[in-house]
Amino acid sequence: MKTGLLFKNAFRDSRRDRGKLILFMSSIVLGVAALVAINSFNYNLVRDIDRQAKSLLGADLVFENNKPFEEEWLNVIDSVPGEKSTEVALLSMAYLPQQEASQFVRIKALEGGFPYYGKLLTEPENFDFQSQQLALVDDGMLLQYNAAIGDSIKLGKATFKIGGRLKSSFGSVDIGSGFAPVVYIGRSYLDSTDLIQPGSLVDYTIYRKTGDDFDPDEWRMLRNDDFRDNGMRIQTVEGQKENLEEAFSSLNNFLNLIALVSLLLACIGVASSVLIYVKNKVKSIAIFRCLGMNGNEAFFIYFIQILALAFLSVLIGAAIGSAIQVFLPIVFESFLPYSVEMEMSWRAIGEGILVGLIITMLFALVPLIRVRNISPLRTLRSSYEEERNQFDRVEWTIYGLIVLAIFGFLWSLMGNLKDAAVFTGGLIGAFGILFGVARIVIWMVRRFFPRNWNFILRQGLSNLYRPNNQTRTLIVSIGLGTAILTTLFIVQGLILKNVSDMGAGNQANTILFGIETKQKDELADITERYGMPLMQQTPIITMDLYGWKGKTKQEWLQDTARTARRWAMNREARVSYSDTVSRNDKVIAGEYIGKVEPGDSIFISLGESWARSLDVGLGDEIVWNVQGALVKTYVGSLREINFRNLETRFFILFPEGVLEDAPQFHVLVTKTPDAETTAAYRNEVVQKFPNVSIIDLGSILVTLNDILSKLSYAIQFMAAFSILIGMIVLISSLFLSKFQRINESVLMRTIGAVKKQILRINIVEYGLLGALSSLTGIFIALVSSFLLVKFVFELNFNVQWIPILVIFVLVTGITILIGLANSREVVNKPPLEILRDNQV
Amino acid sequence: MILEVSEVSKVYEGVNRSLTVLDDINFSVEEGETVAIVGASGSGKTTLLGLCAGLDVSSSGEIRLVNHHLNLLSENDKAEVRNKHIGFIFQNFQLLPTLTAMENVMLPLELQDKAAEAGHKAKELLERVGLGDRMNHYPNQLSGGEQQRVSLARAFSNTPDILFADEPTGNLDDETSVVVEKLLFDLNKEHNTTLVIVTHDMELARKTSRIIRLKGGKIMTDEKVKA
Ligand SMILES: Nc1ncnc2c1ncn2[C@@H]1O[C@H](COP(=O)(O)OP(=O)(O)OP(=O)(O)O)[C@@H](O)[C@H]1O
Ligand SMILES: [Mg+2]
């Protein structure tokens, strides 16, 4: 038979039934739209990062260090030709005298023409804070405290006039700004604040603008390792680009995953609609076969129809996706360090069409290939049931290809074989559970059918297993949708709860740091005067790792066989001393010795994870450089450190009797009863001790909540696609099953069933389906969120049941409603009309 | 011989017992012959017809149709034999609902890649069965009798060597039955087409040249009809 004729027959055959499939194809439209929108946005983002990376970094070369640059390194940095700026940044308290308010801020003291690319958005424009004692203060902070230009701000011991508003903070993504807003001052005024003390947390940055004939990346390549080994960082525009792309690619991957899951959901719909379409066509296929068409030709007639429709839907989906992406920047605005201009991305459209078409067709093929096996005998005997228990190689090949396609897509998305495999496995698992539940339900209902129940219940129940039932499709689509949404919901809730739990009950909620030894006792008095407990008072000494296990750090760095991890070596050691181990810690090896007599060996205690990374164990020797003096110690014990409350904890703990005379700071941890006390306490402390910083859990929570709600906004936007697709799959499954059930309902009406009875039968059926699938979905969500929370976020897992109950009721209710809306037509139309409409 | 059935049985394997529907059937049909198969409901008439036409596979025995051993042919080969040599008429018409009367009749020839000829032939046949003015109507716009006449036209469109009919008049009123019967026998005379007709209708059976009587899956009698 000629191909042309096959096309002709495909066209003729579809003529009268196309409408039935179009509704279903709309789910593909949405799935592809989601994919194209996300990818377009991604490509636009990457392109704009390319365009704007220079003005994001503000310079060609940036050097970062957490202590002042030493002479030797300054010489290297100065060997680069071009302009130079320096910045000293530190966290500190700021006090607004007019408003009587204090705020934790990030002070940046700048000298030089930075930024060389782009500019600080200030009001007044191009505001100069370097040559006068004026501060440039974050606009959001000024608004929060109702402060204006001309008011004062006290930083450490110095008072500045607020000279300008900083409209957008520079360079970094904006997320932490609510927590520590930026205040710019001139570098030359920093000393007057008296905030820089040995051991305080300060970041030093040098910005260089080089000439056009200078290649910063090449320069960086040659020296990067040297700088890094000495605890410094070099950044270039290219490196910045990579960092940004990386930062956004995980968000994008995540959204892409949701889009993929939506597409898969849509494909379940496709598979089931094609199955029903083919079932409706069995008679026609049998006649074709009887008249001498062979199995493959018959298959091809339907394949062409589905392919054409799929192609059309995918194209429409791509068009809608490109339209939607225009709105995505609004959704993601709060994350982006710059504005993204949206343009048509042909690459995203192409990929969306390709992925959409491949996955859709693979899923459609599952029911389609059965067309090959439809026997011509069906013309003689309509009830003839195919014996198809035997293993169909082609069918299994298609299942294999589906898994392979999904895996391939995930792999290209995550760029990691293992993650892709785990996720593919998870998806197969979820599908497996849902299909399994559907099977079990069908089997159970059959097996334990309650014959003595009333007619309506029995009828509704038996609809679950009768021919052409939608049990499998509905349980999978509703279940998967519910699972995705519930997982998001549980995980988000748990992260917030874990954080707020930190301050609950008797847990600490306020921490003061940067306390000098001479201020320690007075601060304790003030705290007790407010009726607040002194939950922790700990000294902190900063020191450098000098060497371990007989070699110096420099020697280890040269050693190619070294097993220590770089981060563990370069970490600036923040050490405390105490006669006992904190109640948050557990000694898991060795024994803690709380006091050492002069002249004895010093046994210290290490955090287990840090010890592992440095590859040292009990008894190993470690030498420290304590602000110039070398101190030799031995590992005496290892601790497991619990990070679940606000109290400070230390990887390195010395016994009493060694560090008492070293320059040191103190930390004080307490619990404030309420926000008013917190504010009063904070103001008093800041005024008496400008160098002391206070962080309270309340402000951390507000910031975290802010970040999470921005994140969840983006996630919810994508999840909405899933829901919408789930709904469409639901509506169209029911719509199609209506055709299956219509004759029966009509017959029942003819026999004399009243409207109410038919509606009740439907309530029972869809209520059962909705309840079962949402329960299964919730179960999957519980498992997956447990795994996520436990192993990815490493938090405590517990579940709030009330919102989950709400989800359950909602999903079940919606299923029933859609089911009823569907059967309304049956009940309201005269029987005859429906029979004629539905004549095949 | 255009059709030879030798020692054919059909057994359906049930869950705990098997059901013998046809038991050791032997007969042959010559070219141009007209044969009626009659018997009570459930006696196996439809099953036998399905086997003869290669729609079904026998449990044992051999069937030769137009010089092909059906047992030795693949599904696709059988489809081709049906398309080239065989016509069907069904009790319940079996028209494709998505095709017009004209397209239904054209289909067998189109399947033989004789599309050019098909339109012409279909038109001629439809006029012959008195539906010249209904060619572009869909099956559900035609009455039962009209649908049966379309299916008759389709059965003849590939000028088959042998035509199988399963109760072709079973659903029709007397008058329409007469029209359909006349068409069947006329076409038989013109093209020397062999007719194998399953029927309950003894009057129709007597118009054929031979009656095979089935009972409980066995041939009871097989006798020529006296003119
Ligand atoms: N797939 C099957 N499985 C089991 N038994 C079957 C099957 N198909 C047909 N039968 C049985 O085979 C017997 C013969 O059926 P067949 O349709 O050939 O009878 P018939 O003579 O055409 O009857 P009627 O005149 O009612 O059409 C019947 O008893 C029927 O129940
Ligand atoms: Mg029969």
Image: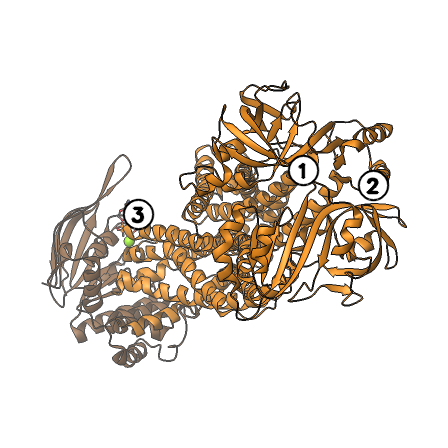
Of badges 2 and 3, nearer the viewer stands 2
Quarter holding residue A188: bottom right
- First in sequence: mark 2 or mark 3? 3
Which residue is at the front of the view, A691 or A420?
Answer: A691
- The residue type indicated by label 1 comes to Val
Which residue is at the front of the view, A410 or B123?
Answer: A410
- The residue type indicated by label 2 comes to Val
Q: Chain of mark 2?
A: A
Q: What colour is chain B? A: brown
- Measure the C-alpha gap from mark 1 to mark 2: 26 Å
Residue A686 image label: 2
Question: Both on one chain, marks 1 and 2?
Answer: yes
User: Which x, y percent locates residue A541?
Assistant: 66, 34
Q: Is mark 3 within 8 Å of ligand 1?
A: no
Q: What colour is chain A? A: orange
Dot 3 falls on a residue whose secondary structure is loop
Is residue A305 shown above or below A389?
below
- First in sequence: mark 1 or mark 2? 1
- First in sequence: mark 1 or mark 3? 3
Of badges 1 and 2, nearer the viewer stands 2
Dot 1 falls on a residue whose secondary structure is helix
Q: Which residue is mark 3?
A: A388
Quarter holding residue B161: bottom left
Q: Residue at x 52, y 70 (%)?
A: A213
User: Which x, y percent locates residue A555?
Assistant: 46, 39
Q: Is there CB contact under 8 Å for labels 1 and 3?
A: no
In the rendered image, the residue lying farthest to the right is A98
Q: Which residue is mark 1?
A: A499
User: Which x, y percent locates residue A750?
Assistant: 53, 52
Quadrant showing the C terminus of chain B:
bottom left
Q: Chain of mark 3?
A: A
Q: Confirm whether residue A824 shows in the render.
A: no
